[in-house]
Amino acid sequence: DPAQGVAAETMLDVINELRAAGAEAMEIRGQEGGRQISVRVGVDTWVVGSPGALIVDSTALGPVYSVLAIGDPPTLAAAMNIPGGAMDSIERVGGTMVVEQS
């Protein structure tokens, strides 16, 4: 999110699309004070804040954001690439999304 345009709603879209694709576990990573912070995503996870300054489950996270999801790699990757979905939403606000499978 180099343009710091990823809003809370966009991050929630990413989380929900991964859940719908069968993600078994997720973690959101971001920066705070020059160090990397991680928050595990649960069923009651919430995201608020302004673009470039998200708060996930009471933990402040700044860009660069990454989301680690455990599940079937091809299915999760396809979910991120649905037209009008998560990747399009992030690119629309000046961010970039890279999907890595392992």
Image (cartoon, grey):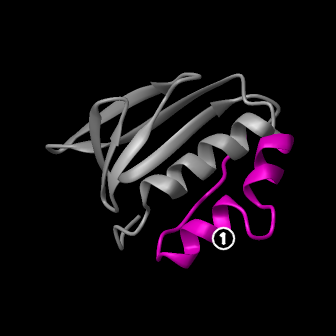
Residue visible at 53% across and 67% down in the picture:
96
Q: Is residue 27 visible?
A: yes
Q: In the image, is residue 78 above or below residue 26? A: below
Residue 102 locus on image (x, y percent): 72, 36
Q: Amino acid at mark 1?
A: Asp
Residue 67 locus on image (x, y percent): 53, 41
Q: Is residue 90 shown left or right of residue 77?
A: left
Q: Is residue 80 shown left or right of residue 26?
A: right
Q: In the image, is residue 39 above or below residue 83? A: above
Residue visible at 14% across and 43% down in the picture:
33
- Along the line of sight, the residue nearer the viewer: 50 or 28: 50
**Residue 32: quarter of image:** top left
| Boundaries of the magenta span | 74-102
Question: At numbered mark 1, what does the secondary structure look like: helix, strand or loop?
Answer: helix
Residue visible at 85% across and 42% down in the picture:
75
Residue 8 locus on image (x, y percent): 44, 53
Q: Is residue 102 visible?
A: no
Magenta segment includes 19:
no
Residue 29 locus on image (x, y percent): 41, 38
Image label count: 1
Q: Is residue 44 shown left or right of residue 7?
A: right
Residue visible at 59% across and 22% down in the picture:
43
Q: Circle 1: is it few (<14), some (14-19), or many (20+) Cα within 10 Å?
A: some
User: Which residue has dot 1 on it?
Assistant: 88
In the picture, which quadrant includes the N terminus? bottom left
**Residue 39: quarter of image:** top left
